[in-house]
Amino acid sequence: MKIADGAVLVTGANRGIGRALVEEALRRGAKRVYAGTRQPYTHSDGRVTPLILDVTNAAQIQGAVARVESLDILINNAGIALFDDLSDRAALEQSLAVNFFGPYGVTQALLPLLTRSRGAIVNVLSLAALAPVPVVPAYSISKAATFSLTQSLRALLAGRGVKVHAALVGPVDTDMSRDFDVPKASPESVARGIFDGVEKGEEEIFPDPMSASIAESWRSGAAKALERQFAALVDAQGVKS
């Protein structure tokens, strides 16, 4: 999968990792970058097509899809992180609405285009998908659920030629993580790492120093082996992909 001359859609494109992904896609020669944002957005590069896209709004998803002519790579990046202690159900529901059902809805709507191009889906996740961060448990739960969604789609869509990647990101210097006093990678370096992983065909992408430190142990570990074992059931049971 190459970014050059391809069409890329990024949700949550107005700041942080999303904005860096737009710029990196342009730098790598993408012919069209669809920038999904909740508020009006402009960009000086004519290859960028802004889309009003709240990933929790079904009508906006359909409206955005109608403007996308072709698509090679979908990057589900939009997300929220709320400090909570799991005592407030509303915080969990909001996290799931944005971080889980958002990528699910956008992916399903754009799947015909991605199937046609034999393209790729990238879900921007977090190391919290593998081990919860106790001060943001609702966020951690939603990211863990979306990681499972990613793995499930990977197996189910393989027969259509659609690749599905999980970007497991450590702390990044964005507004979302400004209250965490830990070493952070720059959004620009993370965007480069994500696209590098896509071009290399990595199923799990570890795009920053903290996440990279566990990459080999994940890829050779029992959980990854079990994922591959379960994925074989798609063909064995005749599941239509």
Image (cartoon, grey):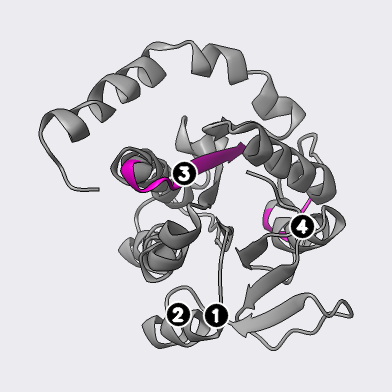
> Which numbered disc, 1 or 4, marks the residue that appears first in the sequence?
4
The correct choice, above or below, for 152 with respect to 201 in the image is: below
Whether residue 94 appears in this view of the structure is: no
**Numbered disc 3: secondary structure:** strand
User: Which residue position is annotated with label 3?
Assistant: 164
> Which numbered disc, 3 or 4, marks the residue that appears first in the sequence?
4
**Three-letter amino acid code at the position of disc 2:** Ile
Crowding at dot 2, Cα within 10 Å, few <14 / some 14-19 / many 20+, comes out as: many
The correct choice, above or below, for 150 with respect to 88 in the image is: above
**Numbered disc 1: secondary structure:** loop
- The quarter of the picture where residue 112 lies is bottom left
Q: Is residue 214 left or right of residue 174?
A: left
Q: Is residue 199 left or right of residue 112?
A: right
Whether tag 2 and tag 4 are in contact, CB under 8 A, the answer is no
Whether tag 2 and tag 3 are in contact, CB under 8 A, the answer is no
Using the numbered discs, state the Cα–Cα distance from disc 1 to disc 2 in whole angstroms: 6 Å
User: Which residue position is annotated with label 1?
Assistant: 53
User: Which residue position is annotated with label 4?
Assistant: 25
Q: Position of residue 34 (x, y in %)?
A: 66, 73
- Magenta residues, start to end: 159-176
- The quarter of the picture where residue 102 lies is bottom left
- The quarter of the picture where residue 113 lies is bottom left
Determine the residue positioned at 79% across, 75% down: 47
